[in-house]
Image (tube, rainbow, N blue to C red):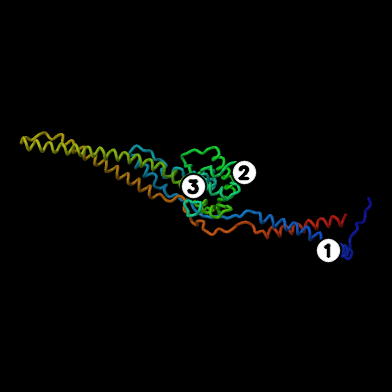
Amino acid sequence: MSNTPQQTIKYPELKVLVGQFFKYALSQYKLFLIVCTVTAALGLVYGKLQPHTYKATSTFIVEDKSGSRGGGLSGLASQFGIDVGGLTGGGAGLFDGDNILEILKSRAIIEKVLLTKIQEEIPQKNKTLAEFYLSFNSLGNKLNNKGINIKDLNFSSIDEKSKHSLIQDSVLYLIYTEIDKGIVVEKKNKKSTIITLEASSSNPIFAKIFSENLLKKTSDMYIDIKTGNLSRSIERIQRKADSLESSLTGIYKKSFEIDNSLKLLNANTGIKLNTSSSEAATRDKTVSNTLYGEVVKNLETLKLSLINQTPVIQVIDAAKYPLFDQRTPARYFLLIGFAVGFVLSLFYIVFKYTS
């Protein structure tokens, strides 16, 4: 087996080769200039074409302090044959853990927000957020180009009880798929209960109003889940109290008539008549008064509990104007384009020099 001696390039020779390459590369400066100018210009144009992005950022916590009162209230309401198990804790699991992160991005919640009418003093006041979105987003132009007049969609006529038309439902879904990309809900720290909501849009006013209503609709949904049973129980007990009040009024009226009749007969005849009917009416009146008093007292206790429900979503920092443009400055794309052009030119020159 023969050993072939390996050729080594000495430093002086390497220095000469590198010098020759640099001379050749410098002779191709026009290529560098043309390619780098073109790629930098393309980068600048790309940067300018990027849509404006305004981010509305809010932080909040989900609170639930009602669970400790559930047992007492359940026992209180059960006196009237009403099962309110979980009335202060029911639905808590829905918002436990990271579920809230997904609920805020759910189609059901976002579509409710899109159908919310704008109350702020802006030109789009009393229009829905869906109509506002289509007025500035390219989706509105795309729909018009397809023969769908966005002015005829009439989202303002839709409420939560009415059904959407096929076109309205389809357009709402298209808006949802676009908006969902700009919503970020996360916990900055896994050990923390503070949640950050970021809603991005090319329109700063829309971003802020949408973010505020997203939190509100989610809070309303949770409050309904948490207090729905309690509210319905209060309504049932209220009907029972109203019935007892009506019955008590009748008893008082009957007792008054009996007492007046007995007094009139005693005065005219001088004969003491049997007062058993009067005594019975008095007993009925006493029992009904006691029962009615207990029902009203318990009803007020339940109402107080409902009033004292802790706000579900407590906003720490709300989104505020001005919202700054979050898009990457065009100059960065210009520099990236220049760097890409330089590297491409260098690779081409190396390939041409060594071939």
Q: Position of residue 188 (x, y in %)?
A: 56, 54
Q: Position of residue 83 (x, y in %)?
A: 38, 38
SS for callout 3: loop
Instruction: Name the quadrant of the C terminus.
Output: bottom right
- Residue type at tag 1: Leu
- Residue type at tag 2: Asn
Residue for badge 3: 116
Q: Position of residue 283 (x, y in %)?
A: 19, 38
Check whether the beta carbons of the residues at disc 1 and disc 2 lie within 8 A of each other: no
Label 3 packing within 10 angstroms: few (<14), some (14-19), many (20+):
many
Q: Tell me if residue 154 can be seen.
A: yes
| Mark 1 → mark 2, Cα distance in angstroms | 52 Å
- Residue type at tag 3: Thr
Q: Nearer the viewer, mark 3 or mark 1?
A: 3
Labels 1 and 2: the sequence-earlier one: 1
Residue for badge 2: 145
> Where, by quadrant of the figure, is residue 252 drawn?
top left
SS for callout 1: helix
